[in-house]
């Protein structure tokens, strides 16, 4: 099997060295300070930096393994959820067996919080946490890569070029995922490359082909290779997407200019906004494990799409956005707090980006409706 130690999650023996590297990384200390103290950090950083580092060093003294890290992070995640969500609900988990491993194929809205919500649901449901697939575009800053890999993330190299290198890279990735499932480590992976910034969920058949690549060396069919990794579609729905204004800006510029160039710190900014921004009501649905796998990636993608889209929760923000876009009467049963907050969100978004903002919120509802009516 090809060596992928440079992209795999850290092991317990790596933890002390990684923790020490993080504590010495000024960019990491700055990121913690900005999350905790926001704009005040830039004014008081000479005073706050050594105190943040000392506090983190004291906390880190309890961390000797990956599990220790996750156990320490769990209460912090609970605080974030209590301050940034109205409610978090879960469905479908009772269909799964905590003694088995699964490949969770998820729609993708938020860089960090999508797999974080999945892990939180599994952790509280008596399941082990997942290994998380992340793109190499997210780990350009060393501390981000360290944080993610110590939290059981593995890196998907999107930047490879050339047929030979791509074949080697994705064959190794496919083998690693299969090995993880066989060793009873569940996997979370987005069903397409990158977030669905427009709110339209479409599974990429190329992802499914990659997952089945390991089957060639085992003389397995596409169906057998996919069946072996026990795929489960996962749907996550946010009442409010903290990054929606950024997404609306990007989509508007791309539509106007034909391309969009990210700022160097844009992914880190999106991560911070996704974690700390208001999400309102959040629902996570685990679909039915796919045991009857069709012969082609395209047919399988359609099955996954249907489960993901129908597993989503339709919130008032989607209904409100659709009504505003179609200039229809507003539904009579909208929650007043949601309506007021959404109107404030629209008012705070530059007018040239508002139409895209509304589409981001309306598209999940429109997909849901079309699938219910059998039109997709």
Image: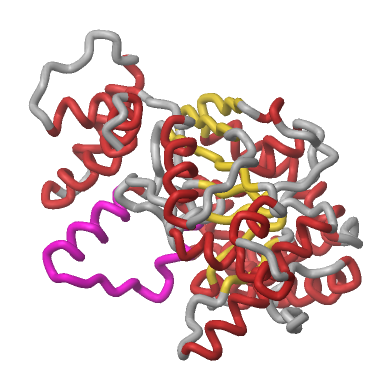
Of residue 144 and residue 322, the one placed in the foreground of this image is 322
Magenta includes 246? Answer: yes
Seen in the image, is 36 located left or right of residue 147?
left
Above or below, 134 against 80 in this view is below
Q: Where is residue 73 in the image (x, y as percent from the top left)?
A: 74, 49
Q: Where is residue 201 in the image (x, y as percent from the top left)?
A: 38, 46
**Magenta region, mostly helix, strand or loop?**
helix
For residue 262, which quarter of the picture? bottom left
Above or below, 54 against 72 in this view is below
Of residue 360 and residue 228, the one placed in the foreground of this image is 228
Residue at point 13%, 70% (across, down): 257
Badge count: 0
For residue 87, which quarter of the picture? top right
Magenta includes 168? Answer: no
Quadrant placement of the N terminus: bottom right
The part of the chain drawn in magenta is 245-271
Q: Is residue 147 visible?
A: no
Of residue 241 and residue 203, the one placed in the foreground of this image is 203
Seen in the image, is 63 located left or right of residue 177?
right
Q: How is the image coloured?
A: secondary structure
Residue at point 38%, 52% (across, down): 196
Residue at point 65%, 72% (across, down): 216
Quadrant placement of the C terminus: top left
Of residue 327 and residue 233, the one placed in the foreground of this image is 233
């Amino acid at each position: 099997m090809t060596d992928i130690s440079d992209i795999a999650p850290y092991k317990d023996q790596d933890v002390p060295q990684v923790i020490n590297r993080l504590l010495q990384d000024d960019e990491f200390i700055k990121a913690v300070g900005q999350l905790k103290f926001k704009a005040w950090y830039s004014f008081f950083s000479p005073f706050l930096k050594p105190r943040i580092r000392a506090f983190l060093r004291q906390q880190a003294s309890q961390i000797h393994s990956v599990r220790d890290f996750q156990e320490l992070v769990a209460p912090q995640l609970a605080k974030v959820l209590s301050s940034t969500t109205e409610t978090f609900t879960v469905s479908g988990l009772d269909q799964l067996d905590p003694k088995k491993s699964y490949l969770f194929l998820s729609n993708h809205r938020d860089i960090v919080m999508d797999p974080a919500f999945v892990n939180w649901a599994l952790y509280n449901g008596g399941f082990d946490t997942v290994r998380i697939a992340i793109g190499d575009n997210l780990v350009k800053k060393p501390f981000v890569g360290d944080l993610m890999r110590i939290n059981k993330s593995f890196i998907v190299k999107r930047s490879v070029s050339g047929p030979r290198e791509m074949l080697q890279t994705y064959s190794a990735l496919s083998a690693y995922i299969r090995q993880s499932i066989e060793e009873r480590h569940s996997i979370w992976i987005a069903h397409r490359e990158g977030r669905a910034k427009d709110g339209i969920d479409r599974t990429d058949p190329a992802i499914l082909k990659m997952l089945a690549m390991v089957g060639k060396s085992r003389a397995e069919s596409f169906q057998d290779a996919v069946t072996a990794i026990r795929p489960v579609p996962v749907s996550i729905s946010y009442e409010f997407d903290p990054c929606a204004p950024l997404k609306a800006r990007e989509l508007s510029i791309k539509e106007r200019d034909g391309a969009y160039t990210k700022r160097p710190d844009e992914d880190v900014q999106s991560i911070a906004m996704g974690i700390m921004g208001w999400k309102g009501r959040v629902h996570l649905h685990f679909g039915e494990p796919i045991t009857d796998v069709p012969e082609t990636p395209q047919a399988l993608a359609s099955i996954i799409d249907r489960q993901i889209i129908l597993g989503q929760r339709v919130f008032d923000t989607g209904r409100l956005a659709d009504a505003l876009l179609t200039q229809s009467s507003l539904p009579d049963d909208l929650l007043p707090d949601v309506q007021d907050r959404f109107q404030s969100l629209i008012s705070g978004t530059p007018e040239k980006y508002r139409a895209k903002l509304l589409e981001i919120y309306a598209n999940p509802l429109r997909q849901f409706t079309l699938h219910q009516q059998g039109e997709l």
